[in-house]
Image (cartoon, coloured by chain):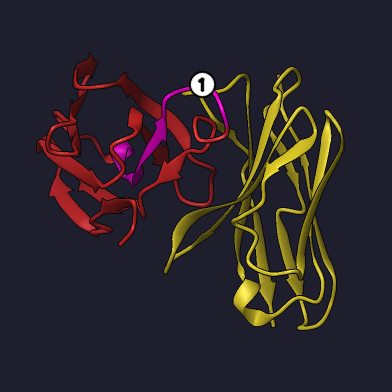
Amino acid sequence: DAGVIQSPRHEVTEMGQEVTLRCKPISGHDYLFWYRQTMMRGLELLIYFNNNVPIDDSGMPEDRFSAKMPNASFSTLKIQPSEPRDSAVYFCASRRGTGAGELFFGEGSRLTVL
Amino acid sequence: QKEVEQDPGPLSVPEGAIVSLNCTYSNSAFQYFMWYRQYSRKGPELLMYTYSSGNKEDGRFTAQVDKSSKYISLFIRDSQPSDSATYLCAMSARSGGTSGSRLTFGEGTQLTVNP
């Protein structure tokens, strides 16, 4: 399997612009997670899905952030409008089953908002 | 107070040294304990996994969990330059339900092993 695939790998945009990050989880995995990583706050869980349904979005910082999972093989994280403090590396991860199953991460999308 | 505390380092050691990485936590519901390794500009990958208290050994790596003290450790013996990475501890509550699906990470400790 190709692993979790994220795009774009790098995004530089200006404040106020819309940003869409994309993720393709590993086939057969029923959980999908979006994390944000910064030097100051480490790895933070934003939202996760089970069988394409959002289960917990309490980590989404503001209404400017939204996430969707229209099918088992695709998810998006959208920021509209973007702000400089959104600059971070955004990771998508997937897992089969609940509990302590191994979480497989993508290589991340590095976002810079000017 | 954060649920999981981890010294961010950085930690720099000579090749061959024994490395000790640690995390403390406050949530007594945590039962699954993991260590992830993250190389520069890559996603984290699972290194070690333990359930409840005890030790687990895998090659040069040993993971220890002390639930009574809410303290976990990762030891690396005979450290190598290829071990240079950020090490993140991670924990989750018992499986099942939404609480069992969340993985809470420490901030990560940046380790450099010098040749």
Please state if B94 lies on the left or on the right of B76 as rendered.
Answer: right
> Residue at the location (14% across, 49% down)?
B13
Please state if A101 lies on the left or on the right of A47 as rendered.
Answer: left
Of residues B91 and A8, the one nearer the viewer is B91
Res. B28 image quadrant: top left
Image x and y of residue A71, in percent:
88, 32
Please state if A36 lies on the left or on the right of B63 as rendered.
Answer: right
| Chain letter, colour red | B
Quick check: can you spot residue B33?
Answer: no
Of residues B42 and A58, the one nearer the viewer is A58
Number of numbered discs visible in the structure rendering = 1
| Chain letter, colour yellow | A
Q: Which range is magenta?
A: B82-97
> Residue at the location (54% across, 43% down)?
B43
Image x and y of residue A17, in percent:
84, 77
The correct choice, above or below, for B23 with respect to B80 in the image is: below
